[in-house]
Amino acid sequence: MLEKKLLTLGSAIGILVCGACFLPPLPEPKLPLPPALASVHTIAIQVEDGTGGKPFDPVIMSSDTASNFNRILMDYRIRAKTFQAGGDRDAVLRITVLNKTASCDPSGNGENFSIELIASYTLMAVDGRVLLSRPRLSSKNGIWQQGNSLPEDLSASTFRRLASESLASSAGKILLLSEHSN
């Protein structure tokens, strides 16, 4: 009888120990935003091409950048959407691309394509106050592609995807680090 009790107790302890190991992790709290952005919940993103070269569609680029911003910063309570005049938002992030370059580097039986963007970022409250500004910030992004082609052959949709990911990532870093420098 004592053996059955000890076996039952040992089994119960084993189940509790092993069961606790396989439980899903507790949810982590949302990361805090810098104090300057405490009242900002929705940001309208407006991307403009100030390069004077072959322009991209600012509405599509703004939409793609907002989508990537939300994907990259999904652990934060701040959300982005495409800028629309008179739209509902707490702030507007204006991103002006000042310079864009594409390059390729042959590698094996394919090529590494990369783009570099230099852009200015200005976050303004709805009342016109500038919450933060970065007049010139460089960002890079790239892909590996099989085949032999030149950067000019990089499709518009691929460029837009790389550029919007790069702009969204830079915007997120700027917002999250804004309490440390302005």
Image (spheres, rainbow, N blue to C red):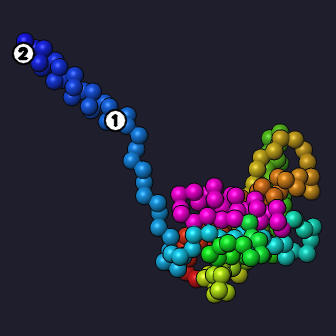
Residue topped by disc 2: 2
What's the residue at 18%, 23% (across, down)?
10
Q: Nearer the viewer, mark 2 or mark 1?
A: 2
What separation in Å lies between label 2 and label 1 (alpha carbons)? 29 Å
Kind of residue sitting beneath label 1: Cys
Residues tagged 2 and 1 counted as in contact (Cβ below 8 A): no
Residue 160 occupies quadrant = bottom right
Q: In this view, does 158 lie to the left or right of 168?
A: right
Position in image of residue 131 (x %, y %) = 61, 82
Q: Is residue 169 above or below residue 108?
A: below
Q: How crowded is mark 1: few (under 14 residues within 10 Å), some or many (20 or more)?
A: few
Residue topped by disc 1: 21
- Decide which of 58, 153 is in the foreground and name it: 58
Position in image of residue 157 (x %, y %) = 84, 53
Do we see residue 171 in this rendering? yes
Position in image of residue 14 (x %, y %) = 24, 27
Q: Is residue 23 left or right of residue 161?
A: left
The total of numbered circles placed on residues is 2
Position in image of residue 38 (x %, y %) = 51, 75
The stretch of residues the image draws in magenta is: 58-81
Residue farthest left in this picture: 2
| 83 part of magenta stretch | no
Residue farthest top in this picture: 1
Quadrant (top left, top right, bottom left, bottom right) of the C terminus: bottom right
